[in-house]
Amino acid sequence: MSAIAVRLLAIGSMAVLTTACAIAGVQHPAADNLATWSDHPLPPDAALAATAVSNQSSCIGDPNRGPVRVLIQDRRTPFTAAFLFAGQTSFGSCFVTTGSGSTSGGSGPLPGPLTAGLAIDENGSGGVGGGTARMLGGRVANGAAQVVIELADGRSVFASIGNGYWLAWWPDTSVARRVVAKDQSGSDTTAVEVPQ
């Protein structure tokens, strides 16, 4: 198996705004308590995506480096999602919560070519909803029907997949041990150990 380039992303504590924001005319709570977190992703949310790419978002870092585009959104509660994004020369990830309007993220250089069926390009943690969350994501070969993250405590988290990328987050510090890509039949196609 070829070496997998992993960039550890230290996602700092999110800046929490004290006022709730109204998205599409609906008032959301000031913070997401993560009680509704799901091990399967929810459908993407356009308001969260708009927040992620806004000039006020820490997802894009320096707005002078040019526009960024969302590669994939992984939403696990009604109000909180993780994103992978890319600019002309940058690649990164972030958490976005509509209730507080807060975001946290970081970025680095674009990853190199995909040389295996699955790559881990983001591996980090940060503050979300008053707690801690971990994030894992990267690229996946065409034809993968599912990507599953196996945690050290025996649980599995089913990743969002799209545009050649996969992404998942969970609201605690449980360590991920392995990531498995599966085909339509449910058979494993690629398995990658998560560097610790």
Image (tube, helix red, strand yellow):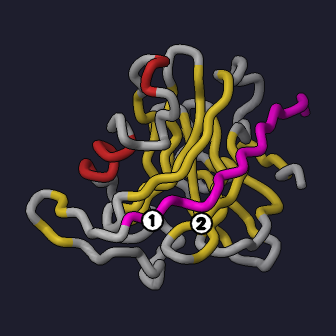
The residue identified by callout 1 is 16
The amino acid type, in three-letter code, at marker 2 is: Gly
Residue at the location (68% across, 59% down)?
125
Magenta highlight: main SS: loop
Q: Is residue 9 above or below residue 113?
A: below
The amino acid type, in three-letter code, at marker 1 is: Val
Q: Position of residue 163 (x, y in %)?
A: 46, 32
Residue at the location (43% across, 48% down)?
73
Q: Is residue 110 above or below residue 178?
A: above
Q: Is residue 79 left or right of residue 150?
A: left
Label whose residue precedes the other's in the sequence (1 or 2): 1
Q: Secondary structure at mark 2?
A: strand
Residue at the location (79% across, 57% down)?
178
Residue 23 image-quadrant placement: bottom left
Residue 7 image-quadrant placement: top right
Q: Position of residue 16 (x, y in %)?
A: 45, 65
Q: How many marks?
A: 2
Q: Is residue 122 left or right of residue 160?
A: right
Gap in Å between the C-alphas at discs 1 and 2? Answer: 10 Å
Residue 92 belongs to magenta span: no
Q: Secondary structure at mark 1?
A: loop
Q: Which residues are magenta?
A: 1-17
Circles 1 and 2 in contact, beta carbons < 8 Å = no
Q: Is residue 70 above or below residue 19?
A: above
The residue identified by callout 2 is 127
Q: Nearer the viewer, residue 26 or 102?
A: 102
Determine if residue 154 is in view. Answer: yes
Dot 2 surroundings within 10 Å: few (below 14), some, or many (20 or more)? many
